[in-house]
Amino acid sequence: METLVLSTAPGRGAKIAGWVLSGLLIAFLVFDGAIKLVPLQVVLDTMAPLGYAPDVATARVLGILTLACTILYAIPRTSVLGAILLTGYLGGAMATHFRIGNPVPTHTLFGLYLGVIAWGGLYLRYPWLRRIIPIKL
């Protein structure tokens, strides 16, 4: 059986795909953070069942955290730090959904899906990340 190793030098298509993944994630997280800053009533209504105080201050803190991590992720020089911070933030969201018994594929693992998109976007763009984490298919 032959082992296929991904090249450490991403091609043009991989870089474009990486930027598209990262761009989609950034757009989603900016929207998510922004609706928490306003905050929309739907945000406040969904906070109490998750175990958070349904008040404007709590929603805004969560919005600021989301936007701060997303901004770090969006800047190429700090994108890995942003991805690390987003991974922690999304892990907390997953734990919250798991704790209250939300459906696993749609709610609990949603943070995992976003994390895979975040790291996948970086992996497709950065050759040094491919060298650190080689994926053998």
Image (spheres, rainbow, N blue to C red):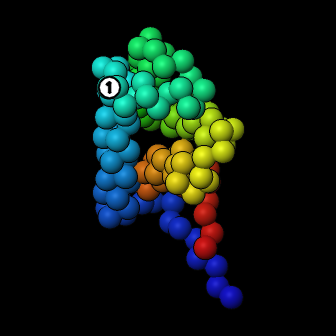
Q: Position of residue 118 (x, y in %)?
A: 47, 46
Q: Residue at x 56, y 23 (%)?
A: 52
Q: Position of residue 130 (x, y in %)?
A: 54, 55
Which quadrant holds the N terminus? Answer: bottom right
Q: Nearer the viewer, residue 59 or 137?
A: 59
Residue 23 percent across, percent down from the top left? 32, 45
> Which is nearer the eye, 58 or 116?
58
Q: Nearer the viewer, residue 106 or 82?
A: 106
Q: Is residue 61 visible?
A: no
Q: Is residue 80 left or right of residue 71?
A: right
In the rendered structure, which amino acid carries the disc numbered 1? Leu
Residue 123 vertical position relative to residue 136 in the rendered view, above or below: above
Q: Residue at x 46, y 15 (%)?
A: 55
Task: Say if 114 sits above or below 70 in the image.
Answer: below
Count of numbered tags: 1
Q: Is the residue 79 above or below the residue 23 in the image?
A: above
State which quadrant residue 25 falls in: top left
SS at mark 1 in the image: loop
- Residue 97 visible within the image: yes
Residue at the disc numbered 1: 40
Residue shown at 57% from the left, 36% from the top: 93
Q: Residue 84 at x, y = what percent?
A: 56, 35
